[in-house]
Amino acid sequence: MRALGLRAQTDTWTGYLGGMQHELGRLDEASRLYAVAEASLSTHGDARYAWLFLARRASIHADEGREREASDGLDLAEARMREANESLMLHALSLHRGHLDLARGEVASARRRIQEAERDDLSLSDDVRFAHRMLAKRLSRVDLPRVEAREGALTVAKGGRHVVLPDGARVDLETRPALRLLLLSLARQRLTHPGEALTTEALVAEGWPGERILPKAAASRLYMAMSRLRQLGLRDWVKRRDDGYLLDADVPLVLDASDAAVRSAG
């Protein structure tokens, strides 16, 4: 029994370590740690925390534009929390659901969740305060200037903060600086030299400026980053060839003028 208790404690701290990564914007690592904690706690630990970490992971899915996964995760977590009558965790979950509101363009709903939480006593729960901070941070980026999306085009927002796909789906890159820089480089190349790929060396220099990386490690890092871009929704438009990577030359592209001018000005 003592061994099980120690394991549950370790699993819980694994989930909270995921929270630290989450606040730092390291979403892949945060999601991984949440999933590890959730899987273990749901079978032989404190299941309440399994559902809490599931809700946190679902908020990341929402921020990444994976609405179906986010909705399914939040619905399951809410059902389990209601069964256990976990009122404080339900308050946290409501705030995590605000990320799904934003993914669906329901900004007013997300703001109401913030206001409702602030009317209550946030000091009652660290988990509610965490959820409040994360949603407030996400909301603070909603009103940033953005280039107007065009139907049927690949639209890259100013600074690469997000991209709107030709089908209207939005992919948020706000917390992924390397992916933002890589996408901007591919977009500028697509505008100035359509059909021509950027080499591994050129993309590594753009994505991780100033870093000295051994060639093999650089190629591996770039491969993982490009794979992530494709997984996030750009699979049909980010192409890999023997000579490097490029954006599909056939898809219409919209890029903010200030970003399009960066290369020529450098």
Image: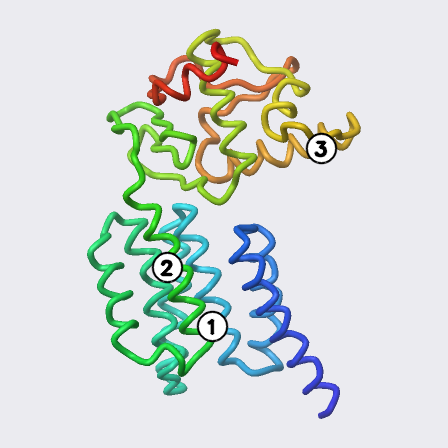
Numbered disc in front, either 2 or 3: 2
Packing grade of label 2 (10 A; few <14, some 14-19, many >=20) is many
Type of the residue with mark 1? Leu
Q: CA distance from mark 3 to mark 1?
A: 34 Å
The residue carrying mark 3 is: 220
Q: Position of residue 5 (x, y in %)?
A: 68, 87
Q: Earlier in the sequence, mark 3 or mark 1?
A: 1
Residue that appears at 37% across and 70% down:
93
Query: The disc labelled 2 sits on which kind of residue?
Result: Leu
Q: Quadrant of residue 204?
A: top right
Q: Residue furthest left?
A: 108
| Residue found 47% across the figure and 24% down from its top | 184
Q: In the image, residue 129 lies at what x, y percent? A: 42, 71
- The residue under label 3 is which amino acid type? Ser
Question: Does residue 159 sit above or below 129 in this rendering?
Answer: above
| Mark 2 or mark 1: whose residue is earlier in sequence | 1
Badge 2 vs badge 1, beta-carbon distance below 8 Å: no
203 left or right of 175 in image: right
Q: Residue at x 33, y 63 (%)?
A: 97
Q: Quadrant of residue 178?
A: top right
Q: Which residue is mark 2?
A: 135
Q: Image check: 242 left or right of 96?
A: right
Instruction: Please state which of the two labelled residues, at mark 2 or mark 1, is closer to the viewer.
Output: 2
Dot 1: element = helix
What residue is disc 1 on? 52
